[in-house]
Image (spheres, rainbow, N blue to C red):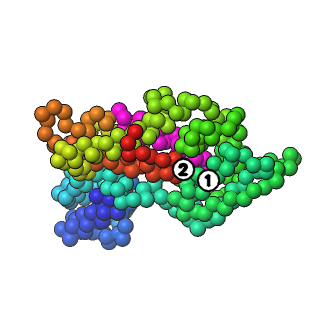
Amino acid sequence: MTPVELSRTVLRAVRRAVDAGELSVAVPVRAVVAPPGPGGCGDYATNIALQLARPAGRSAVQVAEILRPHLVGTDGVADVAITGPGFLNIRLGGADSAVASLVREIGRGSYGHGDALDGQVVPLLIPIPYDLRAEVVADALVRIIATQGGRALVQYAEPPRTDVATPTATTTPTSPTTPMTLRPVPAPEDPTPLGPDAARWALLHPAGHDRPRIDGGHLLQRESNPLHRVRYAHARTRALTRNAAALGFTGTPGDVPGADELLGALAEYPRALRVAATHRAPDRLARHLVTTADAFLALQHLVLPLGDEKPSAAHRARLALAEATGTVLAGGLSLLGISAPDYL
């Protein structure tokens, strides 16, 4: 159940309470649902009871107590708790859980894309003389900014006057369209011998004010190499899909207990993408991919049945979550201009 669908469910509960004579209010046109705040619980919370308290002539807690049974009996709602001054905290269940909704949302494509820079032209200035790292950062930003509805305009500029402050690649612009001169700390040596993927990662993963490390460590297939962990995690998601097919089952979105860290990383991906675009900082995206990969690798051994164990609903839900993780990792690497092989 998406937030929009849950909002409609809350309004239908209000309508039922009004029709039953339990509340005497006009049914609002919209009910706000959002993740619970401090002290809340469940998947979503709504302040609809606080909104209706005054016109109903009751306290918000009383209104929440009236609405709660009308929500609990709804398909997809596992439980409803009342917290604070009258917030209704809703826990979704089964195929309509927050986990399942997140997995389905990722599967629909364009996950993380937003409108933070909608319709805006974002000038990116590369100083002359030419610097490879600035060029690579600009190339990644063209794609990242496009995910937020903006269009990057890459230009080449003469060195700025020494008496005029120029924002760096890690400085937040004063407005979305303020020209930014990309002046990341240059690489100490030519990274191209590393190959296109490792070279780009070496230049994009560090923050703009940090000097990139150019060495063979970016090519090692070891846990110490963040690029390897991200690409290996993606390849594992693809391998799990192939192995599950050989066992005769596919992924089905559902609850996945014990995956809070991974779920948090996936849910945070749209924000990481938005910050990378608005702060002109592709390193934010690169580091978030590492966080997501590490969270997945800690759970990937639980996806498939072990020994004589038969595939269960839990295995199908974990597989669906793994596939969603692979989608996010592949999409993020693509935005950075780095390949995501299915076999590694």
Asked whether the viewer can see residue 42, the reply is: no
Name the chief secondary structure element in magenta: helix
Question: Where on the picture, by quarter, is residue 72?
Answer: bottom left
Q: Residue at x 52, y 40 (%)?
A: 287
Which segment did they paint magenta? 276-298
Q: Residue at x 16, y 31 (%)?
A: 307
Locate residue 198, reporting x and y percent. Answer: 55, 39
Asked whether 272 or 327 is in front, the reply is 327
Q: Quadrant of the N terminus?
A: bottom left
Which amino acid type is shown beneath numbered disc 1? Asp
Asked whether 140 or 64 is in front, the reply is 140
Locate residue 154, reporting x and y percent. Answer: 68, 59
Which amino acid type is shown beneath numbered disc 2? Gly
Q: Residue at x 65, y 41 (%)?
A: 208
- For label 1, the residue is 139
Asked whether 7 or 132 is in front, the reply is 132
Locate residue 100, reporting x and y percent. Answer: 28, 51
> What numbered label is drawn on residue 337?
2
